[in-house]
Amino acid sequence: MIAILDGRPVGLAHYLFHRSCWQKNSICYLQDLFADPDVRGQGIGRALIEAVYARANAEKAEEVYWMTQDFNANARKLYDRIADKTPFIIYQKTF
């Protein structure tokens, strides 16, 4: 998804649907969310996430989830208002 403001792109959201062994229906992973620094705080990020929520709902996905870095304080202020923080910790091995 692309957010357009005054005719120019100012944000984007990449998301995908996938199966889960714990859910009956697919779930939606919000892979990337970006708002141009010049428009942050104007609701662009929230609008993009809400649009992903709407798409996931239309597809009958059981949830939308994403990850962020613990030091991403500005974004987490938004995330804390529009979603539930889970207790999961992510481990990864990069090759």
Image (cartoon, rainbow, N blue to C red):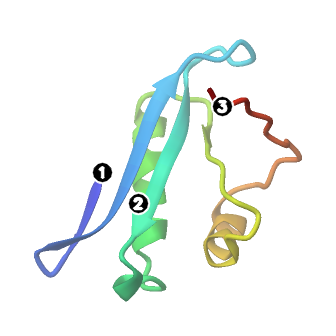
Q: Amino acid at mark 2?
A: Leu
In the image, 38 versus 7, the foreground residue is 38
Kind of element beneath mark 3 = loop
- Mark nearer the N terminus (2 vs 3): 2
Kind of element beneath mark 1 = loop
User: Could you tell me which residue is drawn at 26 percent across and 57 percent down?
Assistant: 2
- Mark 2 sits on what residue? 48
User: Could you tell me which residue is drawn at 39 percent across and 73 percent down?
Assistant: 44
Q: Is residue 60 visible?
A: no
Q: Residues within 10 Å of mark 3 (few under 14, many from 20)?
A: few
Q: Is residue 21 visible?
A: yes
- Mark nearer the N terminus (3 vs 1): 1
| Image marks 2 and 1: residues in contact by CB distance under 8 Å | yes
Residue 81 image position (x, y, % from top left): 68, 70
Instruction: Give above or below for 4 relative to 68.
Output: below
- Mark 1 sits on what residue? 1
Q: CA distance from mark 3 to mark 1?
A: 28 Å
Q: Amino acid at mark 1?
A: Met
- Mark 3 sits on what residue? 94
- Mark nearer the N terminus (2 vs 1): 1
Residue farthest along the front direction in this orientation: 95
Residue 34 image position (x, y, % from top left): 42, 64
Residue 38 image position (x, y, % from top left): 35, 87
Q: Is residue 9 left or right of residue 42?
A: left
Kind of element beneath mark 2 = helix
User: Could you tell me which residue is drawn at 47 percent across and 37 percent down?
Assistant: 56
Q: Quadrant of residue 85?
A: bottom right
Q: Is residue 93 left or right of residue 39?
A: right
Q: Amino acid at mark 3?
A: Thr
Instruction: Give above or below for 6 relative to 44.
Output: below
